[in-house]
Amino acid sequence: MTTNQGYVQTRCPRCGAGAWALPTQAVPCQSCGQAVGPIGAAAMAPQAAPIPPAQMPYGTGAGAAPYGQQAAPYGQQAAPYGQQAAPYGQQAAPYGQQAANPYAGQQQFAGAYPGSAPAPMPAAAPAAATPAAAPASPAAQFSVNVGGIKIPFKLGGGGGMSKFKIIGSVVLVIALSIAGVIIKMKMGGTAKGNLSYASLGVDSKKPDGDKLIAALATPAKKWKKDAMWWSANFQAVDAEGRVDVSKGAEVVYISENGVQSNAKSVRKDSIKKYGAGSAGVKHRDLWGATDAWEGVEQHPAPQCTIKDVMAIVGKQLPAGKTVRVTFDPKFADYYAWRVLSDNPKMDTLYAFSDCSVIK
């Protein structure tokens, strides 16, 4: 073996190629990467006689250097007299110069070649510590956006479900809840806060128009003791006087004294609009007279009801056809039901007193 600047030229125990090694640490083989060395004290022993080519291990490919020359690493020719053999893949340097080390400065090959700094010894791996018990997973906190409103959620940890699976489950529950409300509405259920048709004693799908107006007097009297019926607007009334509430229906009661008060604080809650629909009768909205009304009086009880009017109008209607029936003293010059239709074309007033046509 040949030494140079602390390095020892030896052979790789794996591939047999010429390799550089250090007396105190392992150095990767320049051909196969196998760690070579450390050589130890044996590296400082007197140099053994060179091995003749015929006695070299099979497949090394390294030839003996001429007399006075240093043996070249695997796959290289010996350098001329007085020159040092170049590292693998390089040409020998001119006389008196050291062959260039193309790998100098690269950390993964540090110390592998003459002229490069020895690579630091890897730190000893720390002893495996007994794994501590895993801390409990913190509660998952997130929010779901529904209809533009962020709904916060906090679920306990330790579950096994990912955040996305939890969010998906929550969104699914909300979607099913909304779908349930829609289905309930379509099936005639009553939405929270609405008056049910059962509590009013009328049919939930097609209540009688006259009965609906009369039935709403009870909740109106609970609202204001002086409540009185004021107007009605039914968008779809059939030949029997029944109202299709899915098309829209409104009945208005007022506080007789409230709408005529000069105090704005009294007038602000003087009008109650009942909106009949598929999910019951909505009645929570507050309405008020902008200015004090004058000349308010109780309407005369209609002797000609909506049912009576539709008995007349129904003779002109095709089967299943509906018309609009309204009464609002604000827009009427007479106490009369107004019947409107596009097909057949109709706009007729029928007097409260006897169903006569007012022209």
Image: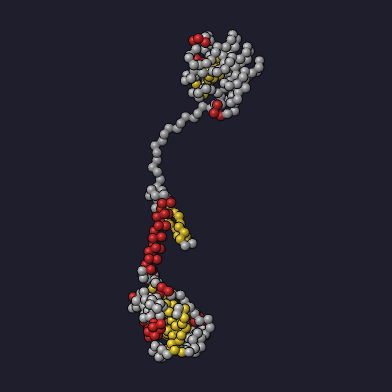
Residue 166 in view in this figure: yes
Q: Position of residue 182 (x, y in %)?
A: 40, 66
Q: Nearer the viewer, residue 288 or 79?
A: 79
Q: Nearer the viewer, residue 262 or 200?
A: 200
Which residue sits at x=54%, y=13%?
63
Q: Nearer the viewer, residue 264 or 149?
A: 149
Residue 299 in view in this figure: no
Q: Is residue 168 above or below residue 11?
A: below
Which residue sits at x=52%, y=16%?
61
Left or right for 41, reference 133: right
Q: Is residue 130 above or below residue 159?
A: above
Q: Position of residue 349 (x, y in %)?
A: 45, 86
Q: Is residue 91 above or below residue 242?
A: above
Q: Position of residue 32 (x, y in %)?
A: 50, 23
Give residue 142's quadrant in the image.
bottom left
Which residue sits at x=50%, y=12%?
56
